[in-house]
């Protein structure tokens, strides 16, 4: 498979995360690196959805997890064979392409069975078994192609039949007796320049007559064959060679292993491992949703690196990353949050700046690489900065954010304040949305020592709507806390008109007893001038957690 590099933000992505992934992937593509793909690990928040619709940009590809899947390891450079090809031609294709298996497909490329050396060996044993009955599933057309024979007379050449193979080298009376003991309509006779045998076979109306070593069929017999509907082929080889080859003129579909079931590209490696072990060739065909073969997966493929790598944006903590990321090479991390204890397999590019938005960093990477920012990307990046800095009013805002926003504003001709108001309003209403949706819209997981907790954040233009549903929100937070065994789960509700917040907390008593913020209501606290989760709130919470026994 072609290598891919997913540029992806954290779980439950906010606007800055999705915008950063989109714009950075575009930068890579403009630099001639088409393998870079923007991705997101969660549903778009209403604000983010509004921004992408407003500027007519396709949102990043949704990837719910990066658990190892078949498509990340399979080989798409495979050879398949049509079901009507002869076994001889199929095996020749296997040898010439050095393929360990050969998917057998119908005319539409849909999977039917798998030819492997195990199946081939079993069928060869049957062919070579002297006790077998000389019955081979074939057609005149396949016999012709297998032998590279010259058709002299043919009838119903593509129809399959179970043929009995006979060698015409006895004296004529002995051969007549043998012929009379069989059903002539299924007999294929191989003979040389025996005119008497040739005539008898045509008179008895055998299914096909094969004349070896390019011996000539007399005109009289040629006409008789036409009259009696007997197919006649001229083989270039000797009788012995012709007899051996004809045994392999069965259609490959009759010889391949029909018990081998395909797997799908989206199947996890964990699911297909036992199936690979059970496969005689330790290989399996991979099909799409229409059952068309798209690749081959083998046990040895799983020993190689996956065909995907990852760039993390707007986060660097493992617990915030998309599930399964630890299985892949991380190329880069671009972030503006605190640095967590994070290890990688190889040296990487790590860009971490104390700015208000990852979009600020991405915008300046365009400038550093001397790549013009497309207007739609500049619009998205400006939205990312304004969203993450609350229109440049958050305590995390730096001069670097301000000058970058002004630069993007000049490119897009968008008014900073007007655009900021639009995007903040687009995500500030929770009417019609469930508590679960609101809490997960921008929820981040944290670990401090042995304690785990989450902090969600939403921006509103009034806290009254959230407070009217306080029982619902506290109940949902508590359910989530218990389900994950967290010390506490919190929801920070930031009032963008007052640049302050209230916080809903569902936590263990030993933690809540340490809370020293002004209480607005039971389990609800007022945080004056606090608007930034990462710069203002998390440090405060970390201090409180340190006091938990």
Image: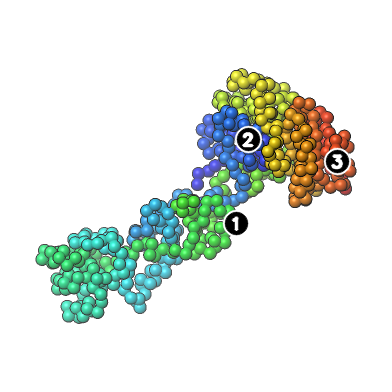
- Residue at (56%, 38%) from the top-left corner? 37
* Mark 3 Cα-neighbour bin, 10 Å: few <14, some 14–19, many ≥20: few
Q: Which residue is mark 3?
A: 522
Give the mark, 3 or 2, whose residue is nearer the N terminus: 2
Work out whether 134 lies above or below 28. below
Could you give the CA–CA distance between mark 1 and mark 2, rounded to whole angstroms?
Answer: 30 Å
Q: Residues within 10 Å of mark 1 (few under 14, many from 20)?
A: few
Which residue shows up at 75% across the image and 51% down it?
483
Judge by depth and name the residue closer to the eye, 20 or 296: 20
Pointer 3 and pointer 1: residues touching (CB < 8 Å)? no
Q: Earlier in the sequence, mark 1 or mark 2?
A: 2
The quadrant in which residue 146 appears is bottom left
Query: Picture coordinates of residue 21 (x, y %)?
Result: 61, 35
Q: Secondary structure at mark 2?
A: helix
**Which is nearer the eye, 424 or 244?**
424
Q: Up-down: is 365 above or below 145?
A: above
Q: Which mark is residue 270?
A: 1
- Say which mark, if any, is on residue 189: none
Find disc 2 in the rendering and name its residue: 18
Disc 3 to disc 2, C-alpha distance: 35 Å
Quick one: SS at disc 3?
loop
């Amino acid at each position: 498979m072609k290598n891919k590099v997913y540029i992806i933000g954290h779980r439950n992505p906010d606007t800055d995360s999705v915008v950063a992934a989109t714009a950075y992937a575009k930068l890579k593509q403009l630099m001639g690196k088409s393998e870079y793909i923007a991705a997101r690990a969660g549903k778009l928040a209403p604000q983010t959805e509004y921004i992408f619709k407003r500027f007519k940009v396709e949102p990043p590809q949704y990837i719910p997890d990066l658990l190892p899947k078949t498509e990340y390891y399979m080989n798409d450079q495979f050879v398949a064979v049509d079901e009507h090809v002869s076994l001889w031609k199929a095996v020749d294709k296997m040898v010439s392409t050095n393929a360990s298996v050969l998917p057998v497909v119908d005319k539409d490329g849909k999977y039917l069975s798998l030819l492997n050396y195990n199946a081939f060996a079993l069928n060869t044993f049957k062919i070579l078994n002297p006790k077998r009955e000389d019955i081979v599933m074939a057609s005149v057309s396949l016999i012709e192609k297998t032998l590279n024979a010259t058709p002299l007379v043919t009838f119903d050449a593509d129809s399959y039949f179970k043929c009995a193979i006979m060698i015409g080298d006895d004296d004529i009376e002995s051969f007549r007796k043998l012929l009379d003991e069989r059903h002539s309509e299924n007999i294929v006779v191989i003979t040389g320049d025996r005119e008497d045998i040739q005539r008898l076979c045509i008179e008895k109306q055998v299914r096909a007559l094969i004349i070896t070593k390019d011996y000539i069929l007399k005109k009289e017999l040629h006409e008789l064959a036409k009259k009696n509907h007997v197919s006649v082929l001229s083989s270039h080889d000797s009788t012995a060679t012709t007899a051996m080859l004809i045994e392999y003129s069965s259609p490959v579909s009759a010889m391949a292993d029909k018990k081998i079931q395909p797997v799908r590209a989206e199947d996890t490696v964990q699911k297909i491992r036992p199936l690979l072990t059970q496969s005689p060739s330790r290989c399996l065909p991979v099909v799409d949703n229409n059952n068309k073969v798209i690749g081959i997966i083998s046990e040895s493929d799983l020993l190689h690196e996956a065909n995907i790598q990852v760039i993390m944006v707007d986060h660097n903590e493992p617990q915030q990353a998309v599930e399964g990321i630890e299985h892949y090479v991380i190329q880069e991390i671009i972030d503006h949050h605190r640095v967590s204890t994070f290890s990688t397999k190889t040296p990487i590019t790590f860009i971490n700046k104390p700015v208000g938005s990852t979009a600020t960093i991405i915008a300046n990477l365009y400038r550093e690489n001397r790549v013009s920012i497309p207007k739609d990307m500049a619009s998205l990046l400006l939205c990312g900065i304004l969203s993450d800095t609350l229109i440049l009013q958050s305590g995390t805002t730096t001069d670097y954010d301000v000058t970058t926003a002004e630069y993007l504003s000049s490119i897009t001709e968008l008014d900073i304040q007007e655009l900021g108001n639009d995007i903040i309003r687009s995500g500030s209403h929770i009417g019609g949305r469930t508590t679960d949706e609101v809490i997960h819209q921008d929820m981040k997981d944290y670990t401090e020592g042995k304690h785990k907790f989450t902090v969600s954040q939403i921006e509103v233009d009034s806290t009254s709507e959230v407070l009217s549903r306080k029982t619902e929100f506290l109940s949902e937070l508590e359910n989530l806390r218990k389900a994950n065994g967290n010390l506490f789960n919190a929801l920070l509700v930031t009032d963008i008109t007052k640049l302050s917040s209230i916080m809903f907390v569902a936590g263990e008593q030993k933690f809540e007893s340490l809370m020293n913020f002004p209480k607005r209501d039971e389990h609800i606290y007022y945080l004056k001038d606090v608007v930034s989760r990462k710069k203002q709130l998390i440090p405060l919470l970390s201090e409180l957690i340190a006091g938990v026994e």
